[in-house]
Image (cartoon, rainbow, N blue to C red):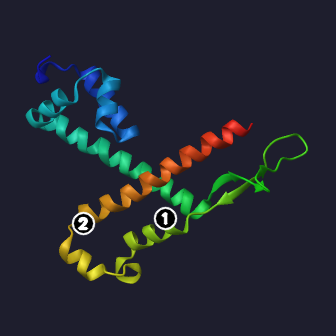
Amino acid sequence: MPASRIGKGRQQRFLAALSVTGNELAAASKAGVGRAKLLELREDDQEFGTQWEKARETFAERLEQAAYRQALQGIPEPLVSDGKCVRDDEGNPLLTLHFSDSLLLALLKAERPEKFGEYAAIAEAIYPAWVRRLAVVLVVACSIWVIGDLALRVASLR
């Protein structure tokens, strides 16, 4: 299928999936289109390219929101004692909130590099802003993966 012949419906499915997953290959699969064809379309169609970037930005914002939640509000985690999940009288696992100090520090470094960044002046001189933001996004993505793994473990306890 020529890149120019990718229908608007498939384009929109791809963009919607990209904004949720942040993964171009998974989003292309969800839309039923090859990634290479979508890359061609992005090069040929400026409007589609702009929408692609907006979808990536939406995903980055979702990552930031998840990072703030984990760093500031905490995530539920089962309470474990002697290697066993502690349960209430009805058999439900007791949960405690887990906060990520490292994620909080990463957010502080991103928001206030002049105060919390060890090498803030050097980093600003060497790395462009998009590289520094990408590093934060990668930290957040890894944290979200850990949260998902934890959620699956909690779900299997029930």
User: Residue 45: where, in percent of width, then height?
Assistant: 11, 33
From the viewer's perspective, is 148 left or right of 18? right
Quadrant for residue 30, please give it: top left
Q: Furthest-front residue in view?
A: 82
What residue is drawn where x is 17% and y is 30%?
36
What residue is drawn where x is 55% and y is 63%?
71
Disc 2 is placed on an element classified as helix
From the viewer's perspective, is 40 left or right of 136? left
Q: Furthest-right residue in view?
A: 89
What residue does disc 2 label? 129
Return the mark for residue 103.
1
Amino acid residing under circle 1: Leu
Residue 2, above or below 127: above
Mark 1 or mark 2, earlier in chain: 1
Residue 65, above or below 21: below
Q: Nearer the viewer, mark 1 or mark 2?
A: 1
**C-alpha distance separating marks 1 and 2:** 19 Å
User: Residue 149: where, in percent of width, then height?
Assistant: 56, 44
Residue 56, above or below 34: below
User: Residue 60: where, in percent of width, then height?
Assistant: 36, 51
Disc 1 is placed on an element classified as helix
From the viewer's perspective, is 4 left or right of 9? left
The N terminus: image quadrant: top left
Q: Furthest-left residue in view?
A: 44
